[in-house]
Image (cartoon, grey):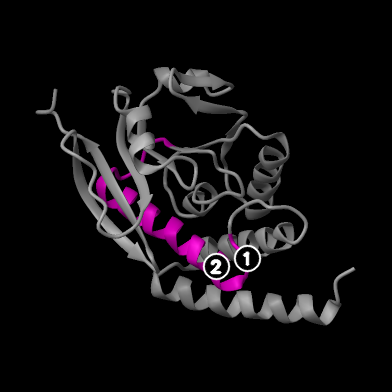
Amino acid sequence: MEDDSRVWDAGLVLDGLLEAALERWGIEGEARARLHRYAEMLSRQLRVRRLSGARDAAEIVAHVEEGLAAAELGRALAGSGTWVDVGSGGGLPGLVVAATWPGRVVLVEPRGRRADFLELASLRMGVEVEVLRGRLEPRGWVGEAEGLAEQEIAVASARAVFAPEEWLARVRNMRNIEWCSVHTRPGWTPGPAWVSGGWREVSAWRVEFVRRDPAAT
């Protein structure tokens, strides 16, 4: 059993770091409260299961900031619409996006326990999301996600699921997707088939939005 004082101290550190980050990103009101609830849940779950690669409060906050960067770019480029997060795992960036995104959010996750966590976390955060138990394979959407092939998608994201090149290869022929969010290192380029809409750099990572170049064959 964990020492209560250590858990309390860790919670205070997380709250302080997250509050400073939310201030930097201009997050206010209910969205701020939602993200505090989410970070607390994620921190607790990370002590009993591996829902993300984060190992401490600073890494949790860095991951949240990546999600905020993605949401900011999405609002600037797409405005609203359906956001689909593939391989949501512990909710990064999907649940972070859901805290501020004005449109529909769909979380695609094949693993049952992680999908259960996404549903519970969204309820406690007070955000509406759809959790689909499925995945994106080279041949397309499978499982509960099959119906996404027929829906207009404003933004599709996938963090720590595929290498950037593989991610773009899987969605290249999906004409129903407007923007793809790519989580990568600074200096990465999307290749000639894609046009960049912009990026934000957070810590050692870059969040970049790209879409197909209509002139590319």
Mark number, residue 123: none
Q: Pointers 1 and 2 in contact (CB under 8 A)?
A: yes
The residue at 64%/62% (across/down) is: 37
Q: Any magenta on residue 32?
A: no
For the residues labelled 1 and 2, the Cα–Cα distance comes to 6 Å
Q: Considering the image in quadrants, where does the C terminus appear?
A: top left
Residue 148: x and y in percent read 46, 23
Helix, strand or loop at label 2? It is helix
Residue 94: x and y in percent read 51, 47
Residue 174: x and y in percent read 33, 23
Q: Image check: 139 left or right of 180?
A: right
The residue at 46%/73% (across/down) is: 21
Q: Any magenta on residue 68?
A: yes
Residue ID for mark 2: 59
The residue at 38%/35% (across/down) is: 166
- Span shown in magenta: 54-83
The residue at 29%/27% (across/down) is: 172
Residue ID for mark 1: 55
* Nearer-the-camera pick, 100 or 95: 95
Q: Considering the image in quadrants, where does the N terminus appear?
A: bottom right
Q: Amino acid at mark 1?
A: Arg
- 203 vs 190: above or below: below
- 20 vs 56: above or below: below
* Residue 36 figure quarter: bottom right
* Nearer-the-camera pick, 203 or 115: 203
* Residue 205 figure quarter: bottom left
